[in-house]
Image (tube, coloured by chain):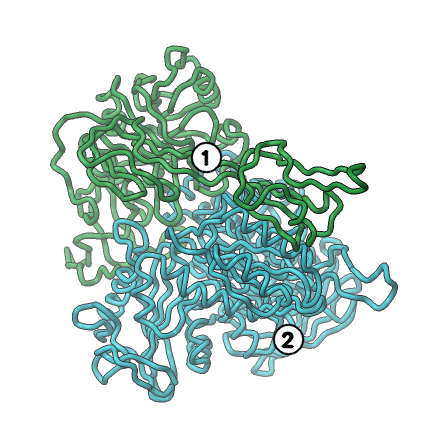
Chain colours: A cyan, B green
Amino acid sequence: MHHLRNRRGLTTLKPNEEMQYILATDVGSTTTKARFFHIMDKEWRFYVAGESPTTVEAPYEDVTLGVRNAVREVEELTGHQILSDDGSHIVIPYDGAVGVDLYCTTSSAGGGLQMMVAGLIKMLTAESANRAALGAGAIVMDTIARDDGRQPYQKIRRIRNLRPDMILLAGGTDGGATAHVVEVAELIKAAEPRPRLGVGYRLPLVYAGNKNLGAEMEKLLSNDFALTLVENIRPVLDVENTEPARRAIHELFMEHVMSHAPGYNKLMKWTEVPIMPTPAGEGMAMQLIASTYKLNVIGVGLGGATTNIYSIVDGRFVRSVSANLGMSYSVTNVMKEAGIPNIMRWLPFKLDEEEIASSLMNKMIRPTTIPQTLEDLIVEHSVAREALRLGLNHHKTIATRLKGIRREKTLSDMFLQAIEDSYIKMMVMDIIAGTGGLLSHAPRRIQSMFILTDAFQPEGVTKMFQDSVFMMPHLGVLSTVYRDAAWNIFDKDCLIRLGTVIAPAGVGTLGERAMSVELEMPDGQRIKEDMNFGEIKLLQLPERQEAKATITPHREFDMGAGPGHKVEKQASGGVAGILLDARGRPLQLPADDAQRSELLAKWFTAIDLYPVDKLKEIV
Amino acid sequence: MCELSEAETKGGEKVSKEAYAYTPGLKVKRAMTVRKTRRLPIPGEVLVEVDDNVDHDTIVARTQISGDPEIVKAAMLIGLEPEDLPRYMTKKVGDKVAKDEVMTAYNSLFGLIKRRVTSPTDGTIESISSITGQVIVRGFPVPVDVDSYIPGKVVEILPREGAIIETNAAFIQGIFGIGGEVHGEIKIAVGSSDDELTEDRIGPGDKRKVLVGGSLVTLGALKKGAEVGVSCIVVGGVRHNDLTKFMGEAIGVAITGQEEVGLTLIVTEGFGKMRMSQRTFDLLNRYGGYMACVNGATQIRAGVLRPEIIIPHEEAHEAAGEELGGGMTPGTPVRIIRQPYFGAIGRVVSLPVELVKAESESYVRILEVELENGMVATVPRANVEIIEE
């Protein structure tokens, strides 16, 4: 049940089962996207979308204008009035003629939530603080630690130049380090960081370190910062407790950060559901997939400016954000970080390096343009593979086991300081879910499935999902107050089942057997495919249908049960189908340009990735 | 945008009367009122008043930013427990201290053992901690000024923050730039908008000038410009590789303005060799010899900021069009900003409503453009920008 305001602004109560209309918006950095949901045949369904430019910047400087325009579009398309007659607010609840029963929103306008985090030891509390801030949907501008390799004056200079929205300070286990934690706090205080938005208000600082230092932190920091004390993020070394810090960050995001962004004070009055940073909403949606299927999920939001990656492995949720990997504003940064040769290796034709570089620079300075030619589209898809690959590498550095955990062996083993591998292993990931403009707008669904496959290189049997119309953040925030409605819309209207990738790990010799796959289709038909190393094949199986797959890898290959061991799994159908991928893991492309181009063209043709005639012309 | 409501039927086909889903064009104005907000990073004192006439280098506001702090591990240096530190301090919180002046003194064994900690900088004692044993010395405040950037008149004061300056000027936006605010006299360095600005066209006499090139600036010309002290180069295009070499690293994200590479560069069309728009070239040519205020700062994401050239003058305004609204209609001049017609200029012929399948197989809203050579091209609406006349 929710406290809601009626047309006159009075708070009323409407039970979930009596609701009929829900409106959700995402105030993005460039576009405000409204999604309108409605009960149809006793089921919550997506009804219609409305979009309008975000109005956070001059000359408008009021986000509610963009929200209103997007909602007006919904009104025009449906004939259903949502805004009050004077347009000053959203009518809540639906009174039989006008309004909606629930309105919620996410926001990333004006740069989202930008945080600085600090801890005592880089690999311990600072790393946990970093994960907590990322999990809350923040962009982490810098991570300060006592042992981060910088001199105090360098850290001070850095903090002075940053203009964060908020600081998260951790350090020490409960009853552990004291003086060194206070040292880090003194350093932050001395640097006098200033908030990014607004002048003359105190920067929010969340302290989530040694609980015994609460009083000391109050004394030291409460005059200069809006200080919030929460439970320790690492109460003991082998426990990471990010939830209290995450909650505090969300509350402060509303109270301090959002209230200083243009128009948000008004928007906050329009909804009783706390405004959530867009990536936090997207993360909630990914968690919804994992909790419903009870499977491990790796999700990605490949945006214009940033790439967010979410993993839920054995229930542990971790998000990473690569703030400068994206397909429009940040496309040249992908080029810079990946290198042009890495982008070019995915092209089945030859282009001049300078030509690619200049065309990507032109995309960056005019980010709203779209590829008209096939060649241009293939170049964008190549960049996407690299952005995703780099994003996943980054994610692996965040999604690590807790370090510094006490071990039972010897005293010298007490602290495990060596860098541990990430626990993100593609063999244990059951689902890959993608969202973002490039994936959603790919002219053929197999394109997004293949881009995700090339970039993430799933191993074993992996279900592939993507969103239909961008609404994961909307459904994520909705799931916090009305999970059943959110899941129903998610399942029916948002998640597109692309299909399943069946790919053994290992490398063999081109042309020699890699695996045999036997599929028992829903109609009882049996299909047997012998796949040689280097081959791919796409089999059709519609959405919401399952085939029983028996996969026998050759002795150099592994499907999860060990080299050469047979596995039996369900393969889910989808709009693209079942992709048998015997190209090996790690996927290696020939170094020779001509050979590589030929192989790529062969793969592209084998799965009908692009229009064949046109592809022949440009290859 | 909901275009259905604006559509009408023409020859059996639905066409939009006006479309808004396009990239707004860059401003190229012969005369307009330009306003600049000049703001301090933190509150301070405003030094001008409304109606004051200012030059581009007049200081309009001033403040002081607190000095850099220095952290001194005093207890550790002197061999004390942190809690004992306050007893041995010779300076208190708030005291001024000079560089190398003693802050902490410890004597024992009747003066046989003397240990001292001195200040690493001139400043004030900000804190003495008995938990960490650290002393923080704050350096003296550093003055920060904001100048008016453009000559003109003060039209509004922002109390404790700065002022808004207004002037009559020609105003040209570029698409991308590097380097910050500079000033200089405009000099056309090429014969036409199609010419390349090469090294040999730049000489010592171009010091502090705003040099206007044509379709391309070469790496040699960029280096020569920086070497002779050119303030700014304005040009149609630059090659990615040349820019990377000139800057010493590749551009990652389009947030620029802070580069210190010896000059400000403003690119008006894009990357690669691209003829400068004739209108931009003609306008710069018209004001050759005038003083220009230029800024290369570019930010594409969140609040688009484009580089600019402001040429103050006293000529009358053009009949100004609507600055904010104004859609695209048949006849509107546009530039195509993506392959396969990148850089081509033409006029809108029609704006069909129906989605059309492009060669890439994307379904897109398109428009038809008659190019300068008479050919009619079909392009996605997202791939054109309006040329503001």
The front one of B259 and A435 is B259
Q: Residue pushed farthest right?
A: A410
The front one of A475 and A12 is A12
From the viewer's perspective, is the residue at label 2 or at label 1 nearer? 1
Q: Residues within 10 Å of mark 1 (few under 14, many from 20)?
A: few
Q: Residue A47, percent across and down? A: 33, 75
Please indicate whether residue B127 sits to the left or right of residue B6 in the image: right
What type is the residue that disc 2 sits on?
Leu
Q: Do we see residue A312 in this rendering?
A: no
Q: Is residue A137 above or below residue B267?
A: below
Q: Is residue B236 above or below residue A508?
A: above
Badge 1 marks a residue whose secondary structure is: strand
Residue carrying label 2: A519
- Disc 1 sits on a residue from what chain? B
Circles 2 and 1 on the same subunit: no
Residue carrying label 1: B142
Residue at point 75% right, 54% down? A509
Q: Residue B349, percent across and down? A: 20, 45
